[in-house]
Amino acid sequence: MLTTREAIEKRRSIRRFKPDPIPNEYLTELFNAARLAPSGCNAQPWRFRIVAEQATKSELAHAAYHQTFIAKAPIVFVCCADIRGYLGGTVSGIQDLGKIGAVENRIVDILLKRTDQLKSCSIEQFGPQIAFNVAIAIEHIVLRALDFGLGTCWIRLFDGHKISDLFGWDENIFPVALLPIGYPEEDPAPRKRMKIEDILI
């Protein structure tokens, strides 16, 4: 098993996959990693759709502006935010923080007021605000996948409305990313990264 540092250093964006199936027990481990991710006020808004059917994968590739490699992955995770789940989970999470004394009552009041204000926002305004919670869970999947020799690729370039229409989702489900996953058929070299001194401001 890789150390966290080894997983971070080994991770690559994989766009060529072997056709080999992924064992169900591996998928369970990946979603368990996502389940354990942190989220604001413990709202846990992440929701996932597993897509293995070829026709549906092709539709996802089409919705992602014809990134055809998506359809060639054995499985694609459609990673989403549950809007109502986030609001409900945030309120209960804030209350829990107050009960255990993790935050002062005045902070609880500020958080509850902010959550109430979010209810009046449009999905276009609100969705991206909670997407970062889902992003943390996705990265847990990405790193855990390496323990099983699996590769992944973050996909954010897609038409979210087409994806929602494909699955019959209402505006409560906000697509955040597509994550093709499978055994790599390539070994990309590491890409250039900034130096530590260049990322400090």
Image (cartoon, rainbow, N blue to C red):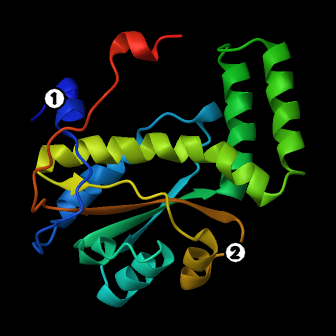
Query: Measured from the top left, where is residue 131 in percent x and y?
Result: 59, 47
Residue type at mark 1 is: Glu
Query: Measured from the top left, where is residue 85 in percent x and y?
Result: 66, 54
At a point 35% along the width and 90% down the height, the residue shown is: 55
The label on residue 6 is 1
Quarter holding residue 83: bottom right
Query: Measured from the top left, where is residue 72 in percent x and y?
Result: 24, 76
- The reply to whether residue 127 is visible in this rendering is yes
Viewport quadrant of the C terminus: top right
> From the viewer's perspective, is 35 left or right of 10?
right
At a point 9% along the width and 35% down the height, the residue shown is: 1
- The reply to whether residue 44 is visible in this rendering is no
120 relative to 133, above or below: below
Residue identifier under label 2: 170
Q: Secondary structure at mark 1?
A: helix
Q: Secondary structure at mark 2?
A: loop
At a point 22% along the width and 73% down the height, the residue shown is: 74
* Viewer-side residue, 93 vs 73: 73
17 relative to 31, above or below: below
